[in-house]
Amino acid sequence: MKSMFLLFILLGVVSGRRTPLLRGLPATSIVEENAPAGVSIYTFNVTGSPLSSGVVAIHPTIVNSNPLTEAFAIVSAGDLMYRVVTTGNPTLDYETMPKHFDLQIFVEDTAGRTDLNRLTVQVADKNERPVFWGNMAIQTVRIYVLEGMPPGLIYKVNATDPENGELKYSPLPESVPFRVLENGDIFSRKKIDYEKDPHCYFLNITVTDPEGLNSTKTVNINIININDESPYFTTKQRIYRIPEEQSPGTVVANITAKDPDDEDSPSRLFYSIQSSDTYFSINPSTGVLQVSGRIDRDVPPLQLHPNVSIVVRVEDSPRGGHSSEMEITVIIGDINDNPPECNPSTFRKEINENTTAGIVLLDLRNSCKDIDVDPPNNLFSFTGLSGFGSNNFALESAESGRLVMTESIDLENPSNPGIEVYSLTVRVQDIASPNYSSKYPFYTFLKIFSCAATAWREEYHMYFEYMHEKISQPCLTMISSCVIFPDTIYIYIRIKPVNEFFPVFSSLSYEFNVPEITKVGSSIGKVTASDADWPPSVITYSIIAGGGTKDYTNAFWISPINGDVKILERLDYETTQKHFFTVQASDQEKTATASVTVNVLEVNDEEPICSPNFYSFQIPVSLAVGTNVNGFRIQCQDRDSDPRSFRYFIEEGNVNNHFTFSPVAGSNTSQLILASPFDYESGLDTKWIYRLRVYITDDNLLSAKNKATHLVKTGTVTLSIRVIPNPTTVTTTTPGFTVVTKRENLYLDSAWYVPFVTTLGSLLLLGLLGHLGALLARWLCARCPSAPQADGTPLINAPEKKKPKKEVALEMIKLNTVFDGEARDPVTGKMYEFNTQSGARRWKKNNEPLQHTAAVQVRSSATGNGGQETGRAEVPSEKVTSEKRKEPREAARPLSGPSQAPGQDGLEIPKQKEEPEDRELPSAAQQRRH
């Protein structure tokens, strides 16, 4: 717009309508740097033409500046008077901005006359205060200095003069242990002791330029206390006395100490016991010395040495530092703590129900003794027979200890409490004082009551595992350890029940409705049976008939313990709508049966499938709230649901709700977001590994009413997130651990084609390897010559079989062949000669020595019945032998008669009988083997 405006002005000037309207321009004015907004720079007037009646259409305006700036503006002063003022944006700076500006001022009156003139503004330099740089320019600088640090540089002040003048720093008072050099370096003048010197100093650093202008900033120096003093004990007592058999946790002494380094705050000291001791322990934070183990004065080593020496150390750091030690002595006092003892102290007896009354069950005196030496301390009695069903039993006398049965027990009798195992106790106590059975009466009563209730509950669940001679040992051990009461005998009498009644099902037939999407292994119902025997017999369940499909013999399974019916094969409504089978209940002796009908229900069976369904990663503890955690994004799909139907929520593991998903619904993709920061310092957070179980449901588009009736499918995703602490964070409560990540590929049930394709590919690969092996074997057989056949055929013509005669025309060419070797034919036993180089061979005549003879190459033309040429033959060689293996052919062997005389070039043989085709001379390879 400004460019268009300037263009219109120039067009007006060029057109000749320019009239001097601006009075006082052109002109030059001066303004100081750093002038605030609104400072008047120059004043001028506008003179209107007679045609305009002194009215201005466009007020004077700065249409251009050189260089460009918005630091100036024109304001009206009234009566066609105007002032050029500073705007403060930007603030004029002599050192960094141009030194002068040319302002183009334009004005137009109502008559259309215009004027354009120039005002030159010069920026004048002004002395400015020194400027601090760095943190000192915006705030008070805090410096932390360790106590005891040697004198030296602790901070460097950085200040400059805008006019580049030389600056001077004012010295610091002598009362502070610091000084400022001319270059702004702050030095300490001595070692500072935190316990003696002030803990904080405020230094006013003043810097002055050559013209006397100065600036002042404050430096706050804080002294940091370090551990340089040893703690000392404030406890003066060194000897303590306690009786034996004190319970763990009993306070023996309260050891206190102080650290001179912590005079302004409570000392943080750490206490420990240096000597080897199993009786006492000390609280590392409070110094409380307490009993940690059993103290028995009556056994070595305390029997001979009752004084226990303990060396206590106090430290001001858990990992090295300053420490002090102190030795204290604890004297153990003796008490009377030897009651009568019975070994064994637990008796087990089994009797049948309806056993005759008056029978003696146990004689307890033979199992008890008192370790006291002198009477009457070693005399004891049996009293206090009590427990469940104690009215059915009695002691003959306090001295005899014989337990008898007073009346018969029938478990099925309604008047009988129905107790299968009777738990009795008999108290054994000293006749002489003190009576140990009455020691700690209230505490013992509470423990017996609690233990008896627990024992009865556990025994009721475990009596099913009873096997003839054994009573439930876990329960007996638990009861024996409930209360340490050495003068009590525990007696367990089990009444063996008799199986008298048949099992009875709660219903003669059961009917279960099962959706077809029910997973394999899911429970679809339960059958129950019981009998009238007491205690109830252990009933086992089984399927004795039915329950099969065309693919599986047993499509259902029943728990033999509780009768829970489960499916072993996924049900299909389109294949079978009803299944029938028979179940049997047995108490090991008697049985009962019931029928079961399973109705298969048709339902929607697709659920969201998300990727990835398991992911493990690490995040820093300082991760900002709202951040996408590790860039993790979950993507879900459901073949029968809209992508907007998904909802995401974390069901398990989200301690303190640190994590959430965004969006939480309405999309098939969502990101894991950090919802709240971690806080381990205050103790709010203690877990470093979060195992999140994320649920994805497809009910987002359903109304609240439809959610109750519509089948909602849920997908799950498991996330393992490990929080990594900051490197400077000392985590003393978390032990070191090693994260082991295990990843496992699992095929979904719907991906049936994966194992099928894998199996098919494996079979094809095996077939290809077999074919290649066959080709390799065939090639090896072709390359390697076979052994000669020992068929017993002689090398000469056999007369026993005649073949059709063929006319053979031979053309013989002399070759200088030397037969330099001989061998024996393994079949006929005859000798033959051969050439070791060419493989040529011939039969050797009797009594003919080895000599140099000429071999012949035979070229034949054999004519059969049709008179056609049937083949060509050469002297036998390896090549010829291999060719004879491939195809039958007639060969003429050279004769060793007069026709082979030297110097004869060729010989026509009229006709000759053909040699048998099934016999050859040995090949060269065979000769070498021979």
Image (tube, rainbow, N blue to C red):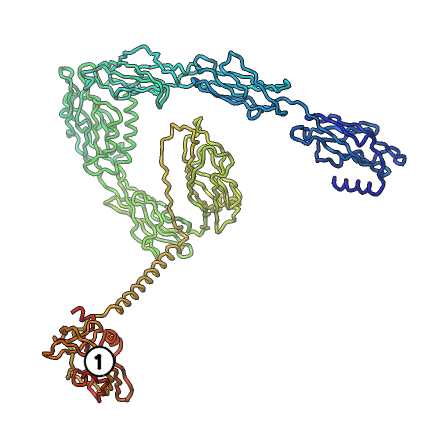
- Can you see residue 446? yes
Query: Can you give x and y, in whole percent of width and height, for residue 169 in the image?
Result: 57, 18
866 lies left or right of 225: left
| Residue extending farthest left | 847
Residue placed at 38% from the left, 30% from the top?
734
Q: How many numbered tags mark residues here? A: 1
Quadrant (top left/top right/bottom left/bottom right) for the C terminus: bottom left
Query: Can you give x and y, in whole percent of width and height, for residue 362 in the image?
Result: 16, 28
Query: Can you give x and y, in whole percent of width and height, for residue 366 in the image?
Result: 13, 25
72 lies left or right of 370: right
Asked where in the image residue 491 lies, by quadrant, the reply is: top left
Q: Which residue is mark 1?
A: 856
Q: Is residue 858 above or below residue 27?
A: below
Q: Callout 1: 10 Å neighbours few (<14), some, many (20+)?
A: many
Asked where in the image residue 773 lies, by quadrant, the reply is: bottom left
Foreground residue, 656 or 351? 656
- Can you see residue 513? no
Foreground residue, 352 or 28? 28
Foreground residue, 182 or 871? 182
166 lies left or right of 905: right
Quadrant (top left/top right/bottom left/bottom right) for the N terminus: top right
Q: Is residue 393 above or below residue 701?
A: above
Query: Can you give x and y, in whole percent of width and height, for residue 778 in the image?
Result: 28, 68
| Residue extending farthest right | 50
Q: Of the residues shown, which amino acid type is indicated by label 1?
A: Val
| Residue extending farthest front | 903
- Secondary structure under tag 1 reads strand
